[in-house]
Amino acid sequence: MVPRTKKNSQQIFVRNGKIFNIPSKLYRQFEDEAIKTIPKKFRLEIDYPVNIKAIFYTESRRRIDLTNLLEALDDMLVKTKVIKDDCRDIVASHDGSRVYWDKERPRIEIEITKVENYERWK
């Protein structure tokens, strides 16, 4: 599974004078593949503050933006109901997240841990 960003992989369409941005085919394929790898037992709709540490291993050394990868990951975790929302009250941090290169085995390793003593705004 080759990590892809949502923001840099968009297609732009115009319909009835309105502009629509949709993820590219490559991103949608990545999202579908990634979603299938998340076991149902982890789809808990977490609603308390967590740190999501994500280690991305890419197949090439092309320039890539960690924040865009994290945004796509958070969206997938919401879509699969691992977390209830990706707002700051739930996703408190991404501490420890990195991007590395592994040509032979591109992948994402995710560790979600509860954040104690975190002030929620809601």
Image: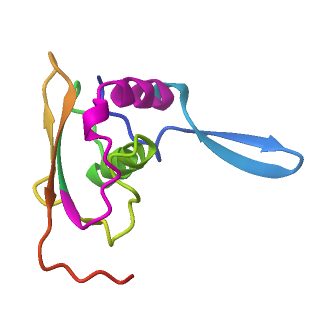
* Residue 35: x %, y % from top left: 38, 30
Position above or below: 103 against 18: above
Task: Give the percent coordinates (x, y) of residue 22.
Answer: 61, 40
* Left or right position of 25 against 118: right
Identify the residue at horizontal 34%, vertical 29% (top origin): 34
Q: Is residue 111 above or below residue 101?
A: below
Image quadrant containing the C terminus: bottom left
Confirm whether the magenta stretch covers residue 49. Answer: yes
- Between 4 and 53, the one lying in front of the other is 53
Q: Nearer the viewer, residue 53 or 102?
A: 53
Q: Which span of residues is magenta-colored?
A: 27-51
Q: Quadrant of residue 91?
A: bottom left
Q: Residue 100: where, in percent of width, then height?
A: 13, 37
Residue 86 is left or right of residue 114, and the answer is right
Name the residue: 37% across, 35% down: 4
Please report the residue visible at 54 percent of the width from the left and 32 percent of the height from the top.
24
